[in-house]
Amino acid sequence: MSFPEWVTSQKRQGFEIKKIGNGYYMYERKSRWDKEKKKSVKATGKYIGVVTPDGVIPSKTRSDETKVVLSSVDEMNPVLSQENEMKPVFSLEYGATAFLTSIAADILEMLGKHFGKRIAEQIWSVSMLRLISPSPLRGVEDRYHTSWMSKMLPNLPLSKSSIANLIDHVGNNRALCAAFMRDMLQPAPYLLIDESWVTSTSEGILRPLPGHNKNNKYLPEINQIHIATVSESGDHMPGFYLNVSGNTPDISAFELTLEDAGVEEGIVLADSGFGSDVNFEELADPKHHLKYIVPLKRSTKEVDLTNMEFEEYFSYHNRGISAHMVDMGAYRIYTFRDVFMYAKELSSSICLAEKANATAMKKRNFDPNKDLHDVSAKAKEGENNFGITVLRTNILDKSASYIYNIYNVRWDIEFLFKSLRNTCEQDASYMQDDTRFEAWTFFGHITISVACRILAKLREKDMRKSWSLEALLDHLSRIHIVKIADEWCIAETTKKTKDLVADLGFHLELNQT
């Protein structure tokens, strides 16, 4: 793996540097005897500290030991001790922390209203630092001490034991979490999504009960029901969540979530596995008040794709969409054709048929009459199904374009969840009891909320094609502040970084603390 030059310059004999997430960390290099291989193999030794452009900042919990370990190589590091004394840190990450604060300061303020100032600052710091540089909770303290967060919100207790106490406090106060989310909830429509299934085998957590998920796996899981909102500009925001047992019926879970959020009506955006006769019959019961948009299989008997004529046309993300509606009284069936998806699926069908023919021709006993596909016939066979989406809904007072746009919010949110699972370890929980799992979920909710604001900003500025969430934060985190003559100053940045900051409409103004 290639490291930046400023990292490489700090390598020394007896130590190694590892890249974890977006950060660089120094460890002692050791070796051990492998009995099976009968030779010495490399082993990672004690953790030393975080590598920054100005040197290695030792772990706070091991600072005394670190000074001893590195005493023989003091010349390698201007930040570590000289004559057994550590100098103050002279460089801190600034750009990403300042940007997040500028677009989401109201979240920190609302957390303070419900949890009190100090707890709110801890929740905010944990959530934001893991968004800037995804890492386990145990790594948050080191990130804090190398970030402007440590000056903006000074002296926060973020040691392993402090975070454990924070988790216990937040997890035991679900009522405060719910009250915070109600206050932050944006106006309707309220979209109900059951996308986030979390696997947990911790014996102390009572909620994970075996149930079949959408992948037909029978595992002890917790189903996280989310309420999201969508603005007129198409930006969606997570508003509320509820953890329910993996075997809780979907409709009951949706209604419990609405009740806890204090709202009366929501729209269920389900996946294709939800569309069963049993669920539709239950939703038709007058005691339920849920609206829904549910995808049906293209082979459904509810529509005849061979003789379909489309009556309505509109655009979605600069793609032409055709629509056909059948009114069934209590519900409607919408059929949509996406011309972009149509061309893609038609091309895929032709390419697959040609590839199969090329493979068949290489067979030893090749028979052209039996082994070759008629490419034209193959394409025409599925032509009516290409680019088709079929939706069933009991929303009777909205247009076809509204139904299509609202349903596609689900896929944007699903993509966001998958991204955060990959970067922030949101797909499996290692919390040991229900209260800690609740806190773990709440931290994730704060992280996702701010991530959605960033994506909304990128869409507003027409920057989605140029910048991903991860790339943006990584680039902004390279903006450092340095201490010169006891004054903190923003370090010189590249033209690309200055242009990025200008495009975001974000001003790098350093407020001294």
Image (tube, rainbow, N blue to C red):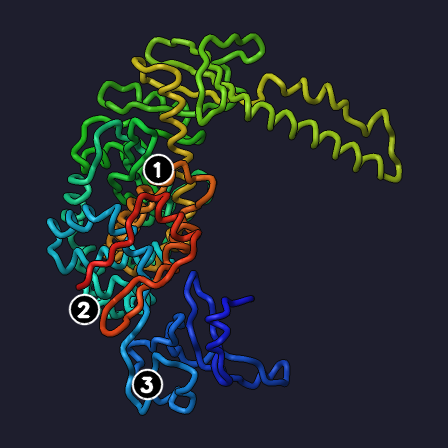
Mark 2 belongs to which amino acid? Asn
Q: Residues within 10 Å of mark 3 (few under 14, many from 20)?
A: some
Circle count? 3
Residue 380 in the image, given as x and y percentages of width and height: 67, 17
Q: Which mark is residue 81?
A: 3
| Picture residue at 39% right of the left edge, 42% below the top | 416
Residue 299 in the image, given as x and y percentages of width and height: 54, 20
Mark 3 belongs to which amino acid? Ser
| Picture residue at 30% right of the left edge, 73% below the top | 90
Q: Which mark is residue 155?
A: 2
Quadrant (top left, top right, bottom left, bottom right) of the N terminus: bottom right
Q: Is residue 164 above or below residue 207?
A: below
Q: Gap between marks 2 and 3, in whole Å?
A: 22 Å
Residue that carries the numbered disc 1 in the rendered image: 194
Whether residue 451 is visible here, answered yes or no, is: yes
Quadrant (top left, top right, bottom left, bottom right) of the C terminus: bottom left
